[in-house]
Image (spheres, grey):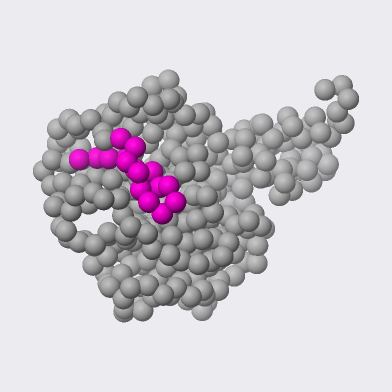
């Protein structure tokens, strides 16, 4: 260490500080402010903060918006702290559509506007434009947040309007929207098909597209974020004699799906994507009976080796798995009612 330049030593130390401490460190001197504002610093700092101690759960209800840590020794929530939205809203009518590296893509339900928001730094950016870009309609649109090979954060917005599909990409770098081509089966444009939020994994955004009745069609749509090409792959071969739900997650840059099927008794399997084919990793043990009131309060699932079914109040139950614990939590990309997210505290900015 004695032979390393002072600048290198300072850089290595600062990239390991919590996000809020980095914000405070910017006021130390002009040199530190310049260093901590570079994209290289932000990228390395972000990569080193993906650990369980730096993850938070953000939950929104009609009265409050709160952030809670996840306690690693019991995988439950820690004490909550109240968050004040830095943008105008009406009665917390904010839906969280996608999240990546500390940024949340949210929708203001009373105006349909899309925003990028970092709840750690409180910075936000409105994505809506006078020419009608950046407006989201629930149950018709789909959103995916990703970063391309040039480290440009982008939003993919899939819009279904009266049987017509429009696909648009927002670039943080150039602060504008543009249209890209996407030809798919006409039936996927119907409101009978539900599009999930996009899950970013290995340079690709993945969406589940599921028909809203028993025995319907279920597929996965893939978007290569660098070539901007779409393709369709099959859904895991799950039984179709009941309701089907597939929720996606990125575990160490490998795509997994938490697939549940059934009606009165649910079967839950974990699948992983290898090439264009799904491989079953394991079948979960039977889930204990859950009352309807509790089931409706489930917000998300999260894994740290075991699977944890979470509600707003904390952990509902644990699905025991014989897996080595991970260094951070991996949430599925679905929250009931879009009213929450598991995110990493970073200094990634919603604007350049």
Write the residue at 52% across / 50% down.
202
The picture quadrant where one finds residue 289 is top left
Give yes or no for residue 212 being in the magenta stretch: no
Q: Is residue 93 above or below residue 282?
A: below
Q: Is residue 50 above or below residue 149?
A: above
Left or right: 223, with 189 as reference point:
right
Write the residue at 26% across / 33% down.
284
Image coords of residue 96 (percent x, y)? 41, 52
What is the chief secondary structure element of the magenta stretch?
strand
Give yes or no for residue 281 being in the magenta stretch: yes
The picture quadrant where one finds residue 94 is bottom left
Write the residue at 59% across / 35% down.
49
The C terminus - image quarter: bottom right
Write the residue at 16% across / 46% down.
262
The N terminus - image quarter: top right
Image coords of residue 258 (percent x, y)? 32, 43
Image coords of residue 161 (percent x, y)? 35, 76
Q: Is residue 189 above or below residue 213?
A: below
Q: How many numbered marks, from 0 up?
A: 0
Q: Which residues are the magenta region?
A: 267-282
């Amino acid at each position: 260490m004695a032979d390393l330049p002072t600048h290198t030593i300072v850089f290595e130390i600062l990239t390991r500080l919590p996000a809020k401490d980095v914000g405070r460190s910017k006021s130390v001197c002009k040199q530190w402010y310049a260093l901590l504002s570079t994209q290289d610093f932000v990228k390395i700092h972000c990569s080193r903060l993906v650990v369980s101690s730096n993850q938070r759960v953000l939950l929104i209800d009609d009265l409050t918006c709160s952030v809670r840590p996840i306690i690693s020794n019991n995988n439950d929530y820690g004490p909550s702290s109240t968050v004040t939205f830095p943008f105008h809203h009406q009665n917390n009518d904010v839906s969280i559509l996608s999240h990546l590296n500390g940024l949340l893509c949210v929708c203001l339900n009373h105006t349909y506007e899309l925003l990028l928001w970092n709840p750690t730094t409180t910075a936000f950016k409105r994505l809506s434009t006078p020419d009608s870009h950046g407006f989201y309609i629930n149950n018709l649109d789909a959103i995916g947040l990703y970063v391309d090979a040039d480290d440009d954060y982008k939003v993919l917005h899939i819009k279904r309007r009266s049987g017509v599909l429009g696909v648009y990409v927002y670039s943080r770098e150039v602060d504008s929207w543009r249209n890209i081509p996407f030809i798919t089966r006409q039936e996927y444009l119907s409101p009978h098909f539900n599009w999930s939020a996009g899950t970013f994994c290995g340079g690709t955004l993945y969406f589940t597209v599921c028909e809203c009745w028993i025995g319907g069609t279920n597929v996965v749509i893939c978007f290569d974020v660098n070539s901007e090409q779409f393709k369709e792959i099959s859904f895991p071969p799950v039984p179709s004699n009941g309701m089907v739900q597939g929720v996606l997650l990125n575990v160490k840059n490998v795509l997994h799906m938490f697939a549940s099927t059934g009606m009165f008794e649910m079967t839950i399997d974990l699948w992983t994507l290898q090439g264009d084919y799904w491989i079953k990793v394991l079948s979960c043990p039977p889930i204990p009976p859950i009352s309807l009131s509790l089931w409706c309060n489930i917000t998300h699932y999260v894994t740290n080796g075991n699977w944890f079914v979470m509600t707003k109040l904390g952990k509902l139950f644990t699905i025991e798995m014989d897996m080595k614990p991970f260094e951070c939590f991996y949430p599925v990309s679905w929250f009931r009612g879009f009213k929450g997210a598991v995110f990493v505290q970073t200094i990634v900015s919603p604007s350049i």
